[in-house]
Image (cartoon, coloured by chain):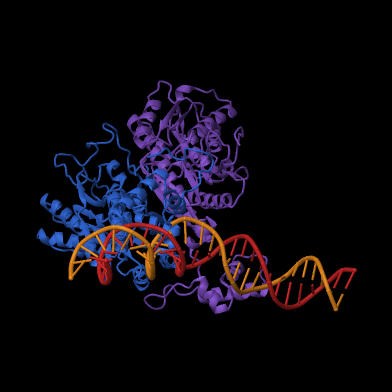
Chain colours: A blue, B purple, C orange, D red
Amino acid sequence: MTPPGENGPRRARVTINDLAAELGLAKGTVSRALNGYPDIAEATRLRVAKAAERMGYRPLAQAQAIRTGRARSLGLVLNAGRSDAHKPFLTDFLDGISRAASEENWTLTVATALDEADEVATLDRLVDEHKVDGFILPRTKLHDPRIGLLRRRAVPFVLYGRTGDPEGCAWFDISGEDAMAGAVARLAKQGHRRIGFLGGHPDFNFSHLRRDGYLAGLEAAGLPHDPALIREGIFTVPEGEVAALDLLDLPDAPSAIVCALDLAALGLYRAALRAGRQIGRDLAVISYDGIPEAATLDPPLTTYVVDTRAAGRRLAQMLLARIRGAAPETLREIVPARLIPRGSDRIWSDARPDRARPDPVSPGTTRQDAQETRASKPQPFA
Amino acid sequence: MTPPGENGPRRARVTINDLAAELGLAKGTVSRALNGYPDIAEATRLRVAKAAERMGYRPLAQAQAIRTGRARSLGLVLNAGRSDAHKPFLTDFLDGISRAASEENWTLTVATALDEADEVATLDRLVDEHKVDGFILPRTKLHDPRIGLLRRRAVPFVLYGRTGDPEGCAWFDISGEDAMAGAVARLAKQGHRRIGFLGGHPDFNFSHLRRDGYLAGLEAAGLPHDPALIREGIFTVPEGEVAALDLLDLPDAPSAIVCALDLAALGLYRAALRAGRQIGRDLAVISYDGIPEAATLDPPLTTYVVDTRAAGRRLAQMLLARIRGAAPETLREIVPARLIPRGSDRIWSDARPDRARPDPVSPGTTRQDAQETRASKPQPFA
DNA sequence: GCCCTTGCCGAAACCGGTTTCGGAAGTGAG
DNA sequence: CTCACTTCCGAAACCGGTTTCGGCAAGGGC
């Protein structure tokens, strides 16, 4: 690779005309040679390729775009209204996408929207202006208006997640349902018989999948399904906290809780503190997402992590394939999440329900008294 | 606004030729009318504008680009290697940028890089391919190779932050130095005389600014500068923890600590727990950044917040101006951070402070807080 | 009444590519 | 030795815009 921007204040772009002139060929010939047309002699193709390399020729994407109709750009519109959620993953996600895209000399165009309607309008605008050739749709909903739009306008897209009506959809997803079922199985194996569930907002497709996975896990373990142990619609930490408190205050409270999202688990940690329950001691927790904070909670949270970077990368590759004509039905992948066992789902049988407790983060510290700091919520390091 | 994608499977784009044919004008005339050339009759301009509106004409950005040399896109390359840091702000930042951009019908192109060299190479590639017209450079360093490249290649850019050699640079920044000085003043006013400092990594320009602000604050308060109370080079929570522990283990430990980043403060919270010090009781803390977790810590962290969304928005506007020819020297803005007083910098009277007896202050006075926000303001920086 | 502006628009070149079309060589069969 | 058939390339059209250039018609000064 040549040192970037090495010479002079304004090294002029070398165009296909320069190349053609240098080679004594017609520019059309050069273009065909570069693009692998069959009616170019092998010797010529080589000569052209070499000269292009030597002169540092880079086709101007937008000049190509106007004839080919390809902007060579992948679109991603983020919802900035729901400011929670994919935040922690965003950098990794973007990195996965943009890296895969740039391997093929494509780029990533991102836009933001404030709500669902704005999202659709933004997609529409980008399509109109032909700024992108296709979209990655994160956070799919059960009924997703974005999909309707893109279908109507016949522009390629790939879902990160699944949706209610799969027709014409390509997707990549993590099997949250298997993770939830696995979590239940793991807890049941430890002897838990009352296992609660903290679920996500029903607008989102993954919420149903994960709840169903939880139920399937119960059934597989031969445990009864008690609707009282289920709280759903959680989207933020505070929401998780109230829902969890709800569960813990039950006369017949669960001894273990499965969380569909780490945000809910964060809330659960707070709720446990307030309810005087000690996670990893008299309450087992398994969650899902793998946010970085999970590792530094006390006790560290056992959770299923998803490799967001890999997801972004794969999504970009699939979208590229879709744009190039692959049928959506052939582009559907579901991969498992990976369980990271940590302390939260282990019950120490020997411990006294008191103060002393193995503290992996800061050994030998006296824990603050929860009652004393009543007003401000005691908080593990989130 | 027309309902998005309303009709048919493939409503064809309306081009400038369609418009011209419909109007019985030459396409060149239509183009000039749309772009406000002075040699078009007002009546004609109106007629064209109306027809364009009615037919839903949207110029194809890349077609314009090839002649005008404007891709109508802003570039942002993120460093995915240093996975920490601006993560929590990223969505807001992107939202600010992309919203300002789309107001002018521009878009945002984002790429990622793994390290500094990759960053420069990525910039170079985007410039070569003319994918973007300019860049926003986040996380500026004292000596920033990205700036060198962009200067050499004469492509417009705007810094988010300042840098060592300001020549030819436009920037937007938050006055971290004033914030740090203000933090010291606030603590000194409470009677603290030994105030420690946890600083960022010296590669980054803001680290020097904030440390200098801390020092200026000391001087303004008439406090001595004790190098032993300063720890720098912090970039992650664990790093913050060891640095803080270092400070707290000092024979003559500080009674208050100013953190240049919330991540360091997070580490400090852990360190305090391990060292048996209680923040808000026998240790006062003021930090900087305003990450969401700060509000839910125990006690809640008093910190200076920066409005990342507003920063993104302003940066985009400034970059646009820069691209349109404004001189970089005229595009330099520094705005103050906003102090959010919470519990961590207040010392409750019944505690026994090490060296100083802070004024007893009831935990509920926000009016005084508001005053202190803009209290002392040393200005050797600008 | 004539000439010189000025206002306004059409025509065509242009931007940097891609794609179509046709023709000049070379090749093999008859 | 023809002739049809490939092989390979040049020329030109094309994509959807922007910009330059020149000319026609109206208007004003003399």
Q: Nearer the viewer, residue B108 or B345?
A: B108
Residue closest to the far top = B251
Give the residue displayed 16% in from the left and 54% down from the top: A182
Q: Position of residue A360 (x, y in %)?
A: 24, 36
Give the residue displayed 59% in from the left and 68% down from the top: B34
Give the residue displayed 33% in from the left and 64% down from the top: A157
Q: Quadrant of residue D4?
A: bottom left
Give the residue displayed 46% in from the left and 30% down from the top: B197
Residue C14 appears left or right of A225: right
Q: Position of residue A108 (x, y in %)?
A: 39, 55
Q: Quadrant of the N terminus of chain A?
A: top left
Kindly tell me whether residue B125 is visible in this rendering: yes
Kindly tell me whether residue A200 is visible in this rendering: no
- Above or below, C1 against A306 in this view is below
Q: Position of residue B149 (x, y in %)?
A: 48, 39
Q: Nearer the viewer, residue B117 or B318?
A: B117
Q: Quadrant of the C terminus of chain A?
A: top left
Q: Nearer the viewer, residue A297 or B206?
A: B206
Residue B176 appears left or right of A132: right
Q: Nearer the viewer, residue B8 or A247?
A: B8
